[in-house]
Amino acid sequence: DAGVTQSPTHLIKTRGQQVTLRCSPKSGHDTVSWYQQALGQGPQFIFQYYEEEERQRGNFPDRFSGHQFPNYSSELNVNALLLGDSALYLCASSLGLMNTEAFFGQGTRLTVV
Amino acid sequence: GEDVEQSLFLSVREGDSSVINCTYTDSSSTYLYWYKQEPGAGLQLLTYIFSNMDMKQDQRLTVLLNKKDKHLSLRIADTQTGDSAIYFCAEWDNAGNMLTFGGGTRLMVKP
């Protein structure tokens, strides 16, 4: 049983560019949440997708957007990259909107230069 | 808003017990969690406790919850070098359907 998988594992982008990160949830899970973890800090909630809609959003600008597909996989898009967007981006999946047991992927390390 | 605080660093000797502490502010939190993160890896869910419980034990792990003081602790018995990692405390935000994490405690286990 595959857990949460994220791609790519590492990525280097230039300031001003756009990036797309991908996440496949754990088998049987239908809800995907995205978190940003800056170096030396705890993860910060970006947003959550359920039934292909953004359900909740943390304190992140509109440059951060996402999508969920019918197969429950999800993408995180970041436009107009800033140096401060360099971080580990973590995807978490769970079953149902109110489910409180979330499983995390290995993350995508984004470096903006 | 919610805030979760942890001490930054803990060093113990192999075989000793480790106790990692956490304080939180959201009294309406229903679940509190401990996650482990090894270098270059994602988060591994270790255990969680429902807010109406005082204690939960799972093999070498013991979670204690003092709801009055909003204090959560994780005790690791017989700590091994493989336990060296960063440990994150997190609370479940019912309103936001999200986890709010502390800054993490780096546990170093010396042989």
Image: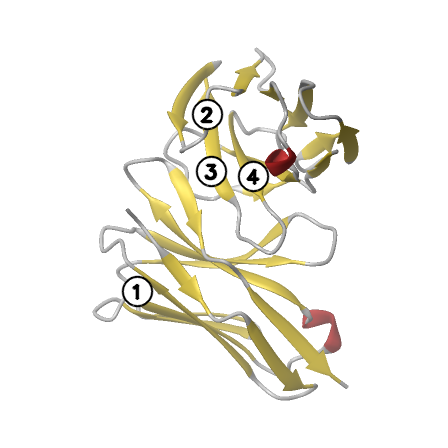
Residue at (62%, 88%) from the top-left corner?
Answer: B16
Residue shown at the point (71%, 50%) measured from the top left: B41
**Same chain letter for marks 2 and 3:** yes
Query: Which is nearer the N-term, disc 4 or disc 3?
Result: 4
Q: Which residue is mark 3?
A: A45
**What residue sits 58% from the left and 12% below the top?**
A69
Instruction: Give the distance between the C-alpha atoms of the residues marked 2 and 3, in whole angstroms.
Output: 12 Å
The CA distance from mark 1 to mark 4 is: 30 Å
* Same chain shared by disc 2 and disc 1: no
**Callout 3 crowding tier (Cα within 10 Å): few <14, some 14–19, many ≥20:** many
Q: Point out the frontmost of discs 2 and 3.
A: 2
In the rendered image, which quarter is residue A8 located in?
top right
Question: How would you rate the neighbour count of disc 2 (Cα within 10 Å): few for under 14, some for 14-19, many for 20 or more?
Answer: few
Chain ID for label 3? Answer: A
Who comes first in sequence, dot 2 or dot 4? 4
Q: Disc 1 designates what residue?
A: B53
User: Mark 3 and mark 1: span between their CA atoms?
Assistant: 26 Å
Residues marked 4 and 3, same chain: yes
Q: Which residue matches tag 4? A: A36
